[in-house]
Amino acid sequence: MQEQLRTSAKSVDCPDDLEAEVGASVQCNVVMPDRTFDVVAKVTSVEGGNVEFDINEV
């Protein structure tokens, strides 16, 4: 997420772990220095121990 936002979040709070299964998702709250917002992280692929996911603001 740090790469997408191009800055570090003060905190990221997710109520659950993100399962390593394609299609799994979790909604998280992100606190930045200048604002707070929610994002959804969704798993797009799983290959061995590598998991790729998209993060989008809600």
Image (tube, rainbow, N blue to C red):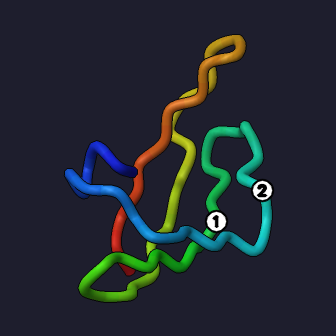
Q: Label 2 belongs to which residue?
A: 17
Q: Residue at 38% of width from left, 81% of height from top?
A: 58
Q: Label 1 belongs to which residue?
A: 26
Which amino acid lies under the numbered mark 1 shown in the image of this protein? Val
Determine whether label 2 and label 1 are within 8 Å by CB: yes
Query: Does residue 40 appear to the left or right of 21 in the view shown?
Result: left
The quarter holding residue 17 reads bottom right
Residue 34 on image: x %, y %: 24, 85
At mark 1, the secondary structure is strand
Circle number at residue 55: none
**Residue 19, above or below 31:** above
Q: Crowding at label 2, few (<14), some or many (≥20) Cα neighbours within 10 Å?
A: few
Residue 28 on image: x %, y %: 57, 73
Query: Separation of disc 2 and disc 1 at Cα?
Result: 7 Å
The quarter holding residue 12 reads bottom right
At mark 2, the secondary structure is loop
Residue 40 on image: x %, y %: 49, 68
**Residue 57, above or below 37:** above
Q: Nearer the viewer, residue 55 or 7?
A: 7
